[in-house]
């Protein structure tokens, strides 16, 4: 049963439950005094695009490189903060749409003043009632609240439809009042007719214009002031739009509401369920375990955090990660940001942007392997928005061709540096890493039209590094200035630095970039020669004297041995340069991971998720399982959102990817069944995992025996570890394996 359920209303935002269709999101609180839906629109960001590139960057970057080459780290960092930092140093930030409050007749006497304020406990208190349940069914994308109050059954059901781009709410049991609230930037809240309220505004002086409308299509009793009043059996529909997507947001919203009203609630509901059910049904995990579905989700989590095991939460978490991507990244929408689509702050931590030194990429690690390939497209489409700004940054900052992005981007695709932090700001690898997703999407789908459309962006990213790579004293080509996100090192004299000439992650990303172009690119002879020459001069993966992978191009001393970033293991995952057959590098990666964990690593949710993926690649099944348990113990909020802290969605997505990676791997030209299956997962099944080559895998295991059915849309030959070269015919192909 893929449901999250609770016996009380959400006491705060971290207990509320998420709905979404990629364009609009809602956090549902389930109150029986006041119901709150905290709403978001994916394109509602504060401010517009500005050219923030520092005009002094181009003439000073050569000097920064010189200072680094002479070991004058502090001087280089001071100059970088002056000459490379953007002006202003911040990009745009994501912000909430509004709060929608539904107040049942039984609670009309409560004060509605300051409803949105976090300190207003009326939102979170609960009237004494019978049989209270709130739940989110992630197989249907339906949120429900039910309870009996004074002998009357109250039901509230809500969903956000992708097919029809509306939110729908059905409420029965009591008359209700409906109120919209927004803290700032609301220009008007008015009655359009006796059953439709409309809110409009602009997110800052040059931000996007937005519109949100809610309509009672059943049970309307009229609008007084800013309050929509409805009868005991009411149906509400709502939609939002911004000027980012269209020239007339109000017109677009009203057209959607009109269409939805004509269709009717039941048809809206059927179309929505059909959409979500198809997505969720593509891929299912069922580790056999005692059923705990009759225990509320928060109680199950508390039990795990007290030392118990609950294998069913692994199944639920896997499904939840898939659901959350389908709810926050759909065809035509923006990509999932740091919080997916769900954000309740006008000044969110890290601006709720797209952080592209791992977090945004991690959001999509499970997209292909977990049968959500089309949900990957918003990220890939965002590359197109970034490209012109990245091209400007390459030329104006570095005097280079091609395009570059630093460690953050926003709704407009801004590629200039963000903040003034030497530990992160001046990293140049954002565009290159994003371009690796082009190769991955093609490896899974084989879509030639897609490759032809997107390959030029990867070539342009490579062109930037052709122009900017610098030779170090050993004749290797390195990025300068650069960092190892977001770590620092100590020089022999005691000086601590961030900026450097060459970090291991840089060369690992560039090996994937240039290697991918050689693998897939329609290249001229000269291009092929250039790429091969660069690959030969990139630093290799070095092992330090202590047996760990070296993090920088020089054997610097680490300051924070338990750092949350594990950038020097990029080559192991998500890249494929450290192969399980290379025992020297595998042992070094193993020791590197252990060193991080022994010194406090994995303390953020997304870092723990990355660690599980790394253990899976190392085929350390018990280590992976221990870190899954630690993820639940330390980094999961009551609504199963990942906790950085605060909430970031990347840990949810990264953990789902890791579970898939433990069951099936398909990189470096071979398929591996059950590479990191823990002893505790004694029997179970998974349906609909995807291997590179567009191969669907249905797998089940029991008593150290596994059965795998591979489905291929074309005749092809594959290599299966432990079996060897195997022809795959169109249709089903069965394999039996010993575990």
Image (spheres, helix red, strand yellow):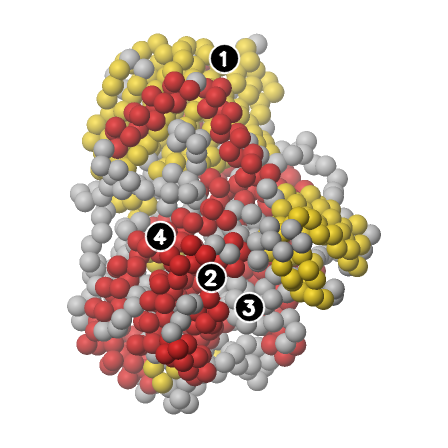
- Give the secondary structure at mark 1: loop
Tell us which disc is closer to us: 2 or 3.
Answer: 2
Q: Earlier in the sequence, mark 4 or mark 1?
A: 1
Residue 73 at x, y = what percent?
33, 80
Find residue 474 and report its image quarter. Answer: bottom left
Residue that label 3 marks:
576
- Disc 2 crowd rating (10 Å Cα; few below 14, some 14-19, many 20+) is many
- Give the secondary structure at mark 2: helix
- Inter-mark Cα distance, 2 to 3: 13 Å
Quarter in which the C terminus is drawn: bottom right
Q: Which of marks 2 and 1 is nearer the N terminus?
A: 1
Q: Which mark is residue 439?
A: 2
Q: Is residue 634 visible?
A: no
Residue that label 1 marks:
173
Residue that label 4 marks:
382
- Inter-mark Cα distance, 4 to 3: 25 Å
Residue at 47%, 39% in the rendered image: 327
Find residue 724 and report its image quarter. Answer: bottom right
- Disc 4 crowd rating (10 Å Cα; few below 14, some 14-19, many 20+) is some
Q: Which of marks 3 and 1 is nearer the N terminus?
A: 1
Residue at 49%, 63% in the rendered image: 564
């Amino acid at each position: 049963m893929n449901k999250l359920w609770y016996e009380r209303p959400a006491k705060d935002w971290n207990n509320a439950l998420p709905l979404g269709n990629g364009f609009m999101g809602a956090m549902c609180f389930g109150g029986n005094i006041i119901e709150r839906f905290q709403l978001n629109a994916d394109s509602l960001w504060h401010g517009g695009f500005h050219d923030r590139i520092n005009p002094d960057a181009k003439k000073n970057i050569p000097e920064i490189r010189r200072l680094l080459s002479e070991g004058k780290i502090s001087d280089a960092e001071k100059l970088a903060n002056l000459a490379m930092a953007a002006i202003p140093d911040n990009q745009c930030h994501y912000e909430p749409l509004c709060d929608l409050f539904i107040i049942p007749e039984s609670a009309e006497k409560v004060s509605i003043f300051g409803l949105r304020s976090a300190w207003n406990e009326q939102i979170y208190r609960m009237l004494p009632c019978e049989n209270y349940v709130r739940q989110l069914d992630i197989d249907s994308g339906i949120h429900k609240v039910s309870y009996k109050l004074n002998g009357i059954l109250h039901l509230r059901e809500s969903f956000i439809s992708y097919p029809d781009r509306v939110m729908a709410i059905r409420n029965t049991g009591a008359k209700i009042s409906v109120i919209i609230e927004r803290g700032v930037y609301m220009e008007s809240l008015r009655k359009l007719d006796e059953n439709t309220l409309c809110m409009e505004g602009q997110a800052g002086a040059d931000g996007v214009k937005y519109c949100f409308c809610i309509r009672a299509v059943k049970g309307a009793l009229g609008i007084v002031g800013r309050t929509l009043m409805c009868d005991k059996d009411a149906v509400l529909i709502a939609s939002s739009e911004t000027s980012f997507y269209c020239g007339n947001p109000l017109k677009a919203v009203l057209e959607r509401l009109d269409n939805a009203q004509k269709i009717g609630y039941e048809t809206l509901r059927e179309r929505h369920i059909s959409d979500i059910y198809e997505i969720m049904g593509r891929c299912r995990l069922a580790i056999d375990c005692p059923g705990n579905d009759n225990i509320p989700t928060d109680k199950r989590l508390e039990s795990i955090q007290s030392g118990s095991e609950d294998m069913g939460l692994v199944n639920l978490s896997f499904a939840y990660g898939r659901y959350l991507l389908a709810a926050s990244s759909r065809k035509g929408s923006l990509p999932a940001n740091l919080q997916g689509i769900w954000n309740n702050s006008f000044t969110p931590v890290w601006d709720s942007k797209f952080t592209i030194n791992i977090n945004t990429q991690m959001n999509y690690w499970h997209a292909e392997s977990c049968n959500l390939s089309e949900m990957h497209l918003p990220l890939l489409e965002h590359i197109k928005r970034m490209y012109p700004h990245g091209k400007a940054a390459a030329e104006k900052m570095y005097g280079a061709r091609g395009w570059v992005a630093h460690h953050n981007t926003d709704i407009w695709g801004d590629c200039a540096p963000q903040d003034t932090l030497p530990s992160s700001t001046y990293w140049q690898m954002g565009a290159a890493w994003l371009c690796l997703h082009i190769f991955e999407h093609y490896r899974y789908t084989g879509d030639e039209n897609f490759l032809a459309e997107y390959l030029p962006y990867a070539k342009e990213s490579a062109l930037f590094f052709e122009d900017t790579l610098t030779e170090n004293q050993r004749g290797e080509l390195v990025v300068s200035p650069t960092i190892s996100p977001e770590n620092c090192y100590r020089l022999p004299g005691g000086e601590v630095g961030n900026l450097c000439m060459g970090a291991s992650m840089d060369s690992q990303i560039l090996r994937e970039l240039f290697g991918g172009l050689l693998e897939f690119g329609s290249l001229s002879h000269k291009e092929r020669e250039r790429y091969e020459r660069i690959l030969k001069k990139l630093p290799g993966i070095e092992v330090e004297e202590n047996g760990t992978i070296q993090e920088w191009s020089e054997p610097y001393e680490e300051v924070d041995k338990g750092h949350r970033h594990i950038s020097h293991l990029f080559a192991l995952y998500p890249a494929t340069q450290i192969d399980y057959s290379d025992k020297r590098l595998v042992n070094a990666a193993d020791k590197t991971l252990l060193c991080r964990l022994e010194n406090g690593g994995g303390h953020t949710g997304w870092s723990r998720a990355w660690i599980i993926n790394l253990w899976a690649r190392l085929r350390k099944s018990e280590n992976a399982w221990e870190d899954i348990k630690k993820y639940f113990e330390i980094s999961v909020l009551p609504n199963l959102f990942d906790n950085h802290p605060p909430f970031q969605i990347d840990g949810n997505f990264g953990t789902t990817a890791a579970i898939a990676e433990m069951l099936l791997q398909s990189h470096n030209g071979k398929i591996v069944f059950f590479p990191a299956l823990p002893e505790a997962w004694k029997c179970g099944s998974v349906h609909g995992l995807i291997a590179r080559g567009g191969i669907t895998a249905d797998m089940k295991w029991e008593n150290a025996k596994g059965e795998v059915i591979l489905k291929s849309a074309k005749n092809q030959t594959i290599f299966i570890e432990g079996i060897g070269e195997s022809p795959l015919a169109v249709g089903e192909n069965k394999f039996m394996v010993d575990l």
